[in-house]
């Protein structure tokens, strides 16, 4: 007798700064969908005492530590990596393998039909092969800048530097299997999430892997 196994459908959610990724993840979570957040994983990896933090200090110097408790100065590091592509690459080489390892670890514990994996740099890190579908949260650039400034209390110049370091809107949209347009109100956003939730649930129900 052949045993059938229903795998978890992996939805890779991505979008530029200020696009509303966290809001969309919360709406999916309200439907009971598990969320794996790459940024949250990265935050855990750089807590005091973690090997990744020590590697960052060795690479960027002690000034990257903000206080006597040994916490990472995230704002200083962010400014550094978005001003210098070499520094950004060094940080990625430290964190990205660890982040993706932890994503795989968390996936082993999920039994739901599908899950959302929020990876802001999904396309930049060429990790689309790690997910089954790419869901892009799209927003006009002018609105993106406005929302990012309001949320992060950063000036327009710094927001634009971050946007330039990320992939372009066109490339992101070309890589998308699904798109959520976040240029309206919360009601519109909720409807789009609900429609995709129903679509992903149905798609996941049709997936059956037959071991060789």
Image (cartoon, rainbow, N blue to C red):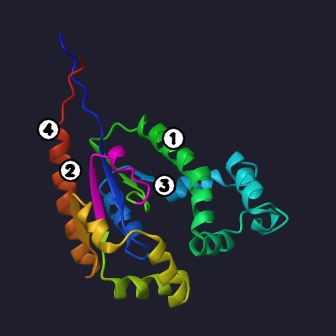
Q: Is residue 168 above or below residue 185?
A: above
Q: Is residue 27 above or below residue 75?
A: above
The disc, 2 or 4, on the residue closer to the chain's N-terminal end is: 2
- Of 167 and 101, which appears nearest the observer? 167
What is the spatial separation of the Cα atoms under label 1 and label 4, in whole angstroms?
Answer: 27 Å
- Quadrant of the image occupied by residue 154: bottom right
The disc, 3 or 4, on the residue closer to the chain's N-terminal end is: 3
Picture residue at 38% right of the left edge, 63% below the top: 26
* Mark 3 crowd level (few <14, some 14–19, many ≥20, 10 Å Cα): many
Q: Which residue is mark 1?
A: 101
Picture residue at 63% right of the left edge, 64% below the top: 87
The disc, 2 or 3, on the residue closer to the chain's N-terminal end is: 3
Q: Secondary structure at mark 2?
A: helix
Q: Secondary structure at mark 4?
A: helix
Residue 204 placed where, x, y %? 20, 42
Q: Are marks 3 and 4 in contact (CB under 8 Å)?
A: no
Residue 11 colored in magenta in the image:
no
> Which circle, 1 or 4, is nearer the viewer?
1
Q: Are marks 1 and 2 in contact (CB under 8 Å)?
A: no
For this view, does 5 lie left or right of residue 60? left
Picture residue at 37% right of the left edge, 74% below the top: 19
Q: Residue furthest front?
A: 86
Residue 160 placed where, x, y %? 47, 83
What is the spatial separation of the Cα atoms under label 2 and label 3, in whole angstroms?
Answer: 21 Å
Residue 101 placed where, x, y %? 51, 41
Q: Which residue is mark 2?
A: 200
Residue 129 colored in magenta in the image:
yes
Q: Which residue is mark 4?
A: 206
Q: Are marks 2 and 4 in contact (CB under 8 Å)?
A: no
Q: Quadrant of the N terminus?
A: top left
Per the rendered image, the range of residues in magenta is 124-136
The answer, for residue 151, to whether it is visible in the render is no
């Amino acid at each position: 007798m052949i045993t059938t196994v229903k795998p978890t459908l992996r939805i890779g959610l991505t979008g530029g700064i200020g696009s509303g990724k966290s809001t969309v993840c919360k709406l999916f979570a309200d439907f009971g969908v598990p969320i794996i957040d790459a940024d949250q994983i990265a935050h855990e990896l750089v807590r005091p005492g973690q090997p990744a933090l020590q590697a960052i200090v060795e690479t960027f110097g002690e000034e990257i530590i903000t206080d006597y408790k040994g916490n990472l100065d995230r704002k200083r590091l962010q400014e550094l990596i978005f001003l210098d592509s070499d520094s950004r690459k060094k940080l990625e080489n430290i964190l990205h393998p660890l982040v993706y390892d932890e994503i795989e670890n968390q996936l082993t514990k999920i039994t739901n039909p599908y899950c959302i994996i929020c990876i802001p740099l999904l396309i930049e890190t060429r990790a689309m092969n790690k997910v089954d579908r790419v869901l892009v949260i799209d927003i006009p650039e002018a609105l993106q800048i406005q929302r990012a400034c309001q949320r992060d209390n950063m000036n327009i110049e710094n927001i634009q530097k971050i946007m330039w370091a990320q992939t372009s809107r066109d490339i992101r949209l070309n890589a998308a299997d699904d798109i959520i347009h976040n240029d309206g109100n919360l009601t519109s956003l909720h409807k789009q999430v609900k429609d995709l939730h129903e679509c992903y649930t149905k798609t996941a129900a049709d997936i059956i892997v037959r071991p060789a």
